[in-house]
Image (tube, grey):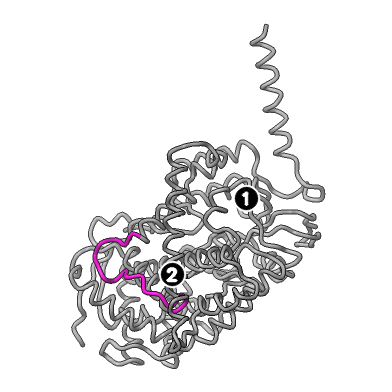
Amino acid sequence: MFALIFFAITFGFIINFIRKFNKKPEGLENIPYISFISLLKILWAYLQQKNYDEVEDLVQELIGGHHDIYLSQFGIVLNNPEYAKILLTESEDVATKYYSKTDNVFFDKFFGCGLSLTNGDKWRSTRKLADSTLNLASHQYPEVVGEITMDLFTFMNPNLNRPINIIETMRRISIEALGKFAFGYKFGCLESQEVPRLISVYDYIVSVLGSPFRLVFPWISELPLESNKKYLDAIKEFDGFINDIIETKRNEMKKDSYNGHDLLTSMIKQGEINIDKHQLRDEIATFFTAGHDTTTTALSVSLYFLAKYPEMQEKARAEVIRILGNEPIIPSLDQLKELKYVNAIIKETLRTHPPTPILTVRRLKKPIKVGSYILPINSTCMINTWKIHRDPKYWENPNQYNPERFLSSDEKRDKFAWIPFSAGPRNCVGQNLTLLQQRVVLSMFLLRYKWVLPENNVNKDKILLKSHFLLTPIDIKLVFTERINE
């Protein structure tokens, strides 16, 4: 009898949970939604570590095909450029950045309250500081990246003519460029063939943050597990790197001859007014991730497609030779502006593989109208960049990699159909810098090397993608050879 009563109570709890889960906010009764059973299928796909595009296809299948808007366990998802525009151009005080510290304790431990997660006056003051500092020094950035790329060529010499991990290689140069430009700091990623400890620690932290198992069962982060202790130890070690950056900079600033204009110098000076040491740490962690991870992915994917489609590589190289000449040099800002086809390659890469496939989680402080729906106050909203970038209504043959689509002057589409850097008042603060870096690196690589996909490459048919909070390619290897001047 006791067992029967226990079963009945448990069954009642389950039914009540399902009913609450399936209950929609008032006014959104007609919106497509992911049912409890569908959610289980999606979570199972995450646990199986299915490729990201397969998970997205499954979601669309379970909600009955493409919809401009749908409701998920995590909030309202917008799949339409017009809807995205409404959310992204709304005042930052109405559509505030949001994430649940309760649901993701580990995320909070690493990122804290950096620029991408703060709101109100705190966000405005830090954003203004970052904008002014980065814009002031951006004209120097091609030279900075070019010098580091020259160092990278030397670093790559022992590994030519055999497969190399291009993701790891691009990460080294992205970290060094970020270190020199944003922090005035040398990480030493190009001094040894060994993977730097900084990269190993960071990769481990990101692997935990993006763990499908922790996504499905977030409460395990608060259990006294050895894996949780290991993660917290990794955070402490990463913070040690940050503290070293800060102390090195402070010691340099004490010298009478110091004249640095990097972002960290500005933040330390501002710290005397309203940035405490904890926020300074959080800002560096945020800029470290946003400043190198997205650029690493974009460069790796572009190099992959230029290997997969040699005719594109040759066309891009011909353009670079025509504008820069036939010897590896560091391009100027004016020369970079002339690289139309190279720029189209970068844009197409960011369309097909946006670094943040689910963009900008926002919490509404007042109701807003999207299409025929009134999204209620306190709604959690997000934008599915992956689907918007592949919507056949705006992109012909959306799954095909085709840079030419960005060269046609007749091409007319909604400006919010391409939003790899978000848009509106909270767009990516470093988007101009990452575009500059990609143009410099790609043009210099085209002058220095030719490259191909190795045989039996796991990415031969398509790029394998991890389902992390950032889109991360898996194991892209390429074979580079010195180019003989033609």
The residue indicated by pointer 1 is 101
Q: Is 185 contained in the magenta span?
A: yes
183 with respect to 459 (left or right) = right
Instruction: Judge whether 273 appears above or below 234 on screen.
Output: below
Instruction: Judge whether 176 appears above or below 218 on screen.
Output: below
Report the front residue among 456 and 265.
265
Instruction: Judge whether 40 appears above or below 124 on screen.
Output: above
* Residue 212, horizontal then vertical, whole percent: 49, 45
Q: Specify whether residue 201 is in view.
A: yes
Count of marks placed on residues: 2
Label annotation for residue 245? 2
Residue drawn at (59%, 61%) of the image: 359
Residue drawn at (52%, 78%) of the image: 263
* Residue 193, horizontal then vertical, whole percent: 24, 65
Q: Is 193 contained in the magenta span?
A: yes
369 with respect to 304 (left or right) = right
Q: Amino acid at mark 1?
A: Lys
Report the front residue among 453 and 222.
222
Q: Amino acid at mark 2?
A: Ile
Q: Residues within 10 Å of mark 2 (few under 14, many from 20)?
A: some
Give the residue furthest to the top. Answer: 1
Q: In which quadrant of the rendered view does residue 325 lie?
A: bottom left
Disc 2 to disc 1, C-alpha distance? 27 Å
* Residue 218, horizontal then vertical, whole percent: 56, 42
Q: In which quadrant of the rendered view does residue 187 lie?
A: bottom left
Q: In which quadrant of the rendered view does residue 2 lie?
A: top right
